[in-house]
Amino acid sequence: MTDSLAGQPQIIDRSIFHEGGDTGILLIHGLGGTPIEMRFVAQGLARAGFTVYCCQLAGHCGTPDQLRLSHRAQWRASVEAALDKLRARCGTVIVGGLSMGALLALDIAHRRPKEVDGLLLFAPSLRLDGWAMSWLSRHVLPWVRPTSYHSNVYLKEHEPYGIKDERIRSFVVSSMQSGDSSAAGVFSTPLHSFAHFSALSAEVKRVLPGIKVPTLILHPREDDMASLENAITIQRRLGGLVELVVLDDSYHIITLDRQRHLVVERSVAFAQSIERQQAGAMAAAFPRQRQRAEQK
């Protein structure tokens, strides 16, 4: 089979950027998603004075076929480029992500530990084992790995679509069904993309003990897509200080759902704590630097 993007529309960059202070926050959307699912949180963080960048992963915000032909190395490259952009502007950078985006946040913290000062993990998903997921998702997908053959199999989204709030759910479903994936993501996700998600998950799981930056995890107790056990596993295995907040009135997409205001509130507080820690470290280092200079 020959895979080609010939005749496919060009993917428009839907990334979101808010200029702010010297602390930057990189937000990464989930598999098949869009930067818009991070917009509410981004706006809240921007109002608190942070520089915020919601990057767009390669292959996303286009057609399902364009998503199918992207892979985890390209998604990693999208995050690398976004981190470089923030690092050029900000002295402190916190990386956050939703679902698979949280795995990419963990991944970049492992690969570039000196450039990531904190992690914000929103409903992190090592496996899709939530109460609404199918037997295939819970028991087969974790073992699927990418091959050179790009399968034409697509798995459709289904109720409740990660959202408990019925009004917001209705809007998201309408947007997905309209065919414009830039607004709410694709309505069906390629099996090949899930294979790369599963491979990424296995890779990240192995390196968790080596990730030592301060981390805030927010995860819903009633997650329909990825059970709370995902967050608990990450909390137990990470090598640094971890705070876990369990939400009691949201499904998977917590950045849009009923408790999105609480997500913003806790994210802002966490970012401010990292900012204070960095300022304290700088203040402690400055007298030592001055003393060495005077001795010379």
Image (cartoon, helix red, strand yellow):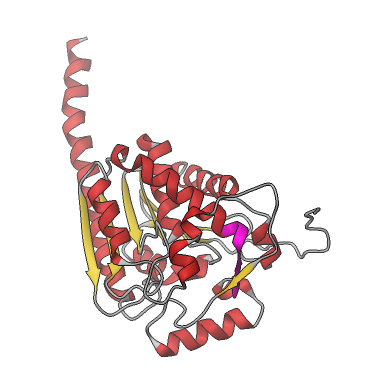
- In terms of image quadrants, where is residue 166? bottom left
Q: Quadrant of the N terminus?
A: bottom right
Q: Is residue 210 left or right of residue 75?
A: left
Q: Residue furthest right?
A: 7
- Nearest the viewer among 169 and 125 is 125
Residue 49 lies, in percent from the top left, at: 33, 60
Residue 28 lies, in percent from the top left, at: 46, 58
Q: Residue furthest top?
A: 296
- The residue lying at 56 percent from left, 49 percent from top is 72
Q: Is residue 181 above or below residue 111?
A: below
- The residue lying at 35 percent from left, 68 percent from top is 44
Residue 163 lies, in percent from the top left, at: 41, 80
- Nearest the viewer among 240 and 228 is 228
Q: Using the rendered image of the protein, determine whether residue 56 is visible from the camera's viewpoint.
A: no
Q: Is residue 214 left or right of residue 20?
A: left
Q: Quadrant of the C terminus?
A: top left
- The residue lying at 61 percent from left, 54 percent from top is 58
- In terms of image quadrants, where is residue 188? bottom right
**Span colored in magenta:** 187-193
Per the image, is 164 magenta?
no
- Nearest the viewer among 23 and 55 is 55
Residue 93 lies, in percent from the top left, at: 37, 47
- The residue lying at 22 percent from left, 16 percent from top is 293
